[in-house]
Amino acid sequence: MALLAARTALGDNGANVAILWGLAMRIAIPLLLLLMAMSAPARLAAAAGLEVGKDCHVILTCNFRRNASVRGCLSSYSCRQCSFVRRSVVSIDGVRRSEWRSSCDWGAS
């Protein structure tokens, strides 16, 4: 779209269009690389089967008392998941803003 507008404004002068195209690419390519780098941790976690915002652990509970109904160790898997919850809505200088807090809970995967 911008290239078409540049060609129309410059009378389809190839040299000027090439200069504008070069400038656009100097801006677009680093911006694209920055966005890709910022999303890499989330993509890697998803590829590894992990979910962003979860903290999962294997919990080992052992009981070797003589009179226990079951003796031995039990392995379980539990995840702590955090999310932002709206706490309240406040008005500052006539502008309504939401207050958020982090809420974490333990549960299954």
Image (tube, rainbow, N blue to C red):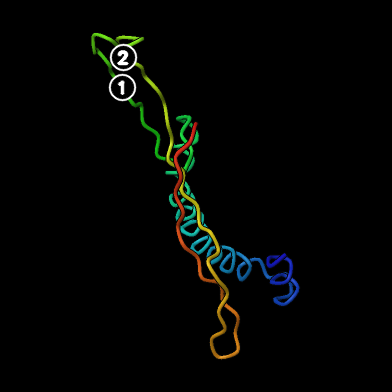
Task: In the rendered structure, find residue 2 and report the number of the disc placed on it.
Answer: none
Residue 51, horizontal then vertical, whole percent: 48, 38
**CA separation in Å, label 2 and label 1:** 6 Å
In terms of image quadrants, where is residue 5?
bottom right
Total marks in image = 2
Which amino acid does the dot numbered 2 rest on? Cys
Left or right placement of residue 34 versus residue 64 in this view? right
Residue that carries the numbered disc 2 in the rendered image: 73
* 11 is higher (above) or lower (below) than 102: below
Which amino acid does the dot numbered 1 rest on? Thr
Instruction: Say which of 109 and 87 sits in front.
Output: 87
Residue 17, horizontal then vertical, whole percent: 63, 67
Q: Residue at x 58, y 74 (%)?
A: 89
Mark 2 touches mark 1? (CB < 8 Å): yes
* 47 is higher (above) or lower (below) than 12: above
Chain-order first, disc 2 or disc 1: 1
Residue that carries the numbered disc 1 in the rendered image: 61
Instruction: Say which of 3 and 48 sits in front.
Output: 48
In terms of image quadrants, where is residue 41?
top left
Residue 30, horizontal then vertical, whole percent: 46, 58
Instruction: Say which of 63 and 98 sits in front.
Output: 63
